[in-house]
Image (cartoon, rainbow, N blue to C red):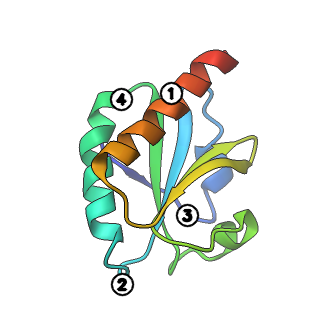
Amino acid sequence: MELKSINDGNFDSKLSSKDAENLVFFWAPWSKPCEPFQETLADLAKTYDGKLEIFCMNIDENANMPATLGVKTIPQLSYIENGVISASLSGRQAKVKIREFLESVVSHGKEGR
C-alpha cells in the first residue's frame, strides 16, 4: 500500500472515508527521524491494506491542519477520528512500536463498527 499525500485543502475530504481507519503521518523533510519512520510505516502499511488509510502531510508545506490539531512533535502518526486526534505515536520509534500502534487502531475500528 502506498502512503498517500494529503494537504490543508483536501484534509477533510480525504479523511471522510468510512471504509477504513484514517491515519496521518506528519513529517518534514529536514527531520532526520522522519525518514526511517516513514520507510517503516510504508513497509508495514502493506499488511493493513483495506483496513487503514495512511496519509502523509508535510508540515512545512501545510501548516494549518497540524496547528489546528495541535501537532507539536514530528514525526507523528495520528489516528484521526471525527476530526480530532484520538491517538498518536511520535518521535523516533522501533518497528515493533509502530506495528503495535497500527494494530491498536485496527482493533479500535473493529470495535466501533
Q: Residue furthest bottom?
A: 30
Using the rendered view, name the quadrant where residue 82 is placed.
top right
How far separated are the C-alphas under marks 1 and 4?
11 Å
Identify residue type, mark 3: Asn
Q: Which residue is mark 4?
A: 49
Question: As drawn, is 90 to the left or to the right of 49?
Answer: right
Q: CA distance from mark 1 to mark 2?
A: 30 Å
Residue 7 disc label: 3
Amino acid type of disc 1? Val
Give the SS element for disc 4: loop
Q: Which residue is mark 2?
A: 30
Distance, label 3 to label 1, CA atoms, is 24 Å
The first of marks 1 and 2 along the sequence is 2
Q: Amino acid at mark 4?
A: Asp
Q: Earlier in the sequence, mark 1 or mark 4?
A: 4
Q: Which residue is mark 1?
A: 106
Which marked residue is nearer to the observer: mark 4 or mark 3? 4
Seen from the viewer's position, the closer of residues 96 and 39 is 96
Specify whether residue 1 is in view.
no
Does the residue at mark 4 contact the one at mark 2 (Cβ under 8 Å)?
A: no
